[in-house]
Image: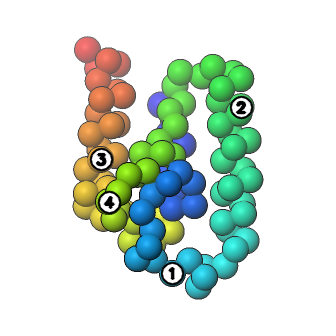
Amino acid sequence: MAILQPVAYVGNPKLTHLNFNKWGKEIELQYKNVYPLIKDVMRKRGHKWIVDYTDMFSHDEYIYIDKAHVSPNGNLIIAKQIYKDIKPYLE
């Protein structure tokens, strides 16, 4: 199983507590340009073994502690989803 991981630049996470100016615009542009290409390839090829978690944190809760790392509640959200996704393969 492969996971297209969430990052703060993709989706609609709550980010008002972070200062993105210190990280620069270049990396943001890379994610915003490359992730849609990856999603398009995933859709066209229909690979069921690749899952898209990029919108996993798109709700009204602080999860990111920087542009890529998340708080314990973010880790729990991801862990529960990974378990849900791999459980059918374990049965």
| Residue at 65% over, 37% down | 39
Residue 41 seen anywhere in this rendered image of the structure: yes
Question: Left or right of 90: which side holds 13?
Answer: right
Instruction: Point out the residue furthest to the top here.
Output: 91
Which residue is more in the foreground, 31 or 49?
Answer: 31
**Which callout, 3 or 4, points at the residue further toward the start of the chain?**
4
Residue shown at 33%/65% (left/top)? 62
Residue labelled with disc 3: 77
Label 4 secondary element: loop
Measure the C-alpha gap from mark 1 to mark 3: 24 Å
- Point out the frontmost of discs 1 and 2: 1
Residue 11 x, y percent position in the rendering: 53, 51
The label number, if any, that marks residue 19 in the structure image: 1
Residue type at mark 2 is: Val
Pointer 3 with pointer 4, Cβ within 8 A: no
Residue under the image location 53 percent in, 21 percent down: 48
What amino acid is at disc 4? Glu
Q: Which residue is mark 2?
A: 41
Q: Residues within 10 Å of mark 4 (few under 14, many from 20)?
A: few
- Residue 42 image position (x, y, % from top left): 65, 30
Circle 3 or circle 4, nearest the eye: 4
Image coordinates for residue 6, horizontal then vertical, percent: 49, 51
Say what secondary structure mark 2 lies in: helix
**Sequence order check: which comes first, mark 4 or mark 1?**
1
Mark 4 highlights which residue?
A: 61
- CA gap, disc 4 to disc 1? 17 Å
Label 1 or label 3, whichever lies nearer to me, is 1
Tags 2 and 3 touching, CB below 8 Å: no
